[in-house]
Image: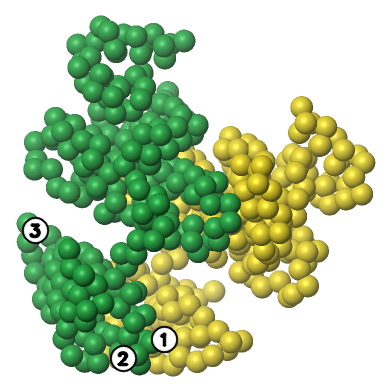
Chain colours: A yellow, B green
Amino acid sequence: MIKAIRRFYNYYLSPERELVRRLRRLLGFTPAYLKVFKLAFQHKSNNQDTDPNDPYGGQNNERLEFLGDAVLGTIVAEYLYKKYPLGDEGFLTKMRSKIVKRNSLNKIGDNMGLDELLSTYNNVRIAKSMLGNAVESLVGAIYVEQGYKGTTRFVVKEMLRNYVDITHLETFDDNYKSQLLEHCQKNGRRVDYSVVKRFKQDKRDRFKVAVLVDGQKLAVGEDFNKKAAEQIASKRALVDMGLKVSK
Amino acid sequence: MIKAIRRFYNYYLSPERELVRRLRRLLGFTPAYLKVFKLAFQHKSNNQDTDPNDPYGGQNNERLEFLGDAVLGTIVAEYLYKKYPLGDEGFLTKMRSKIVKRNSLNKIGDNMGLDELLSTYNNVRIAKSMLGNAVESLVGAIYVEQGYKGTTRFVVKEMLRNYVDITHLETFDDNYKSQLLEHCQKNGRRVDYSVVKRFKQDKRDRFKVAVLVDGQKLAVGEDFNKKAAEQIASKRALVDMGLKVSK
């Protein structure tokens, strides 16, 4: 009942009703507790809003991310479990990681237009990685307000159906490292990775990694994340070996 | 309603009522769908019980594990989120991994007496690792029958309260590798790990790993899992260096 009144107020009367309507289009429902949702879009916020009577306690953006990451993983797991009644555990695990991995979440956040909401609440340049985190904290905020069922409705109807091409993911394999490894093992060739350079960029560690097949350097890749650099190098090696078309 | 009748039948009339009562003591409720629970205790089973009208589709032990692993992770995340209103994301993540990591789940399964149930359905020697898997598939089975709320009740009341010492976990640090690394970095010493032996035991790969400080071999550890072997070796190195009391 209180929630319904809050929703009515938020949608029709609140001075922030423009934001409320934007959220409604995004969420598929009118948020009752605006504070949590605003928090979800604040980068690295503090425990300012701690209410000792709130069962969910202090809410800050990173705590919401922690909660949202877990909830999202479970909802996607259940969705796949039901969608693929004969899919084995290995297939389900792979499909899930394709959906919830950093890169996909960044794209989903981008397609949802979260960059706009993020720029409203942050005076920094919106980095790609902030979009995926915002998806997670948004899911966390929805969970705090709506519980498991309501969050499932949002994730399946608003997120997966609109922004994830599940059928495409079934056959899509972007683990270039394992593709390269598999191909080389079949042909009795040995694959190694080595960090050829490690340096600071924007105050962060950046890695340049080389992939070697039978000791011969085939390609290099560069990223802030060592594993991502290995993936880039592996993809280039696959293209060089004629096993993959570059795009 | 149908569930209530099934429960009554299972508890009072079923030829398997002995099992049902054992499950009741374990679960805190009488299971309505016995099949799923029996399946949870079958090691590496197949999709024998696929019912196309069942929204959860084909159920096999590993699929239940996949589902249970996700659900358990989320319930524990939510529990910690509420229990520690001021805990930051790093603390919550660490606490969660202490609770749901392989080793803890094996111990929880052992304390729950799952080994007995496992021996009823499997003609193999019950390995320690099967206990943790059984905890996960049991949680998956409960989720299929009871949904999110009912599973939360089980995990919090029957599992966490009885078998997990949360307060102890707050200060307990069993990541010996990171402890060793931290200590050595403070003192400008270098830590390396190297696989000194890799061999087959019970048809599985087993690793013997040495930990080297400033190039000097301090200790070795052995396990089927390379990371676990590194942890064992690191713990021994810490004991040797007088930084930890062996027990």
Residue B181 image position (x, y, % from top left): 33, 80
Q: In this rendering, is residue B202 above or below B198?
A: above
Q: In the image shown, does A159 or B194 lie closer to the viewer?
A: B194
Provide the secondary structure element on which disc 1 rests. Answer: strand
Q: Are marks 2 and 3 in contact (CB under 8 Å)?
A: no
Task: Name the amino acid type tagged 2.
Answer: Arg
Residue picked out by circle 3: B203
In the image, A110: left or right of A104? right
Residue A161 visible in the current orientation? no
In the image, B82: left or right of B38? right
Read off the chain for label 1: A
Residue picked out by circle 1: A209
Residue picked out by circle 2: B189
Read off the chain for label 2: B
Q: In the image shown, does B100 or B55 lie closer to the viewer?
A: B100
Q: Looking at the image, is mark 1 or mark 2 nearer the viewer?
A: 2
Residue B135 occupies quadrant: top left
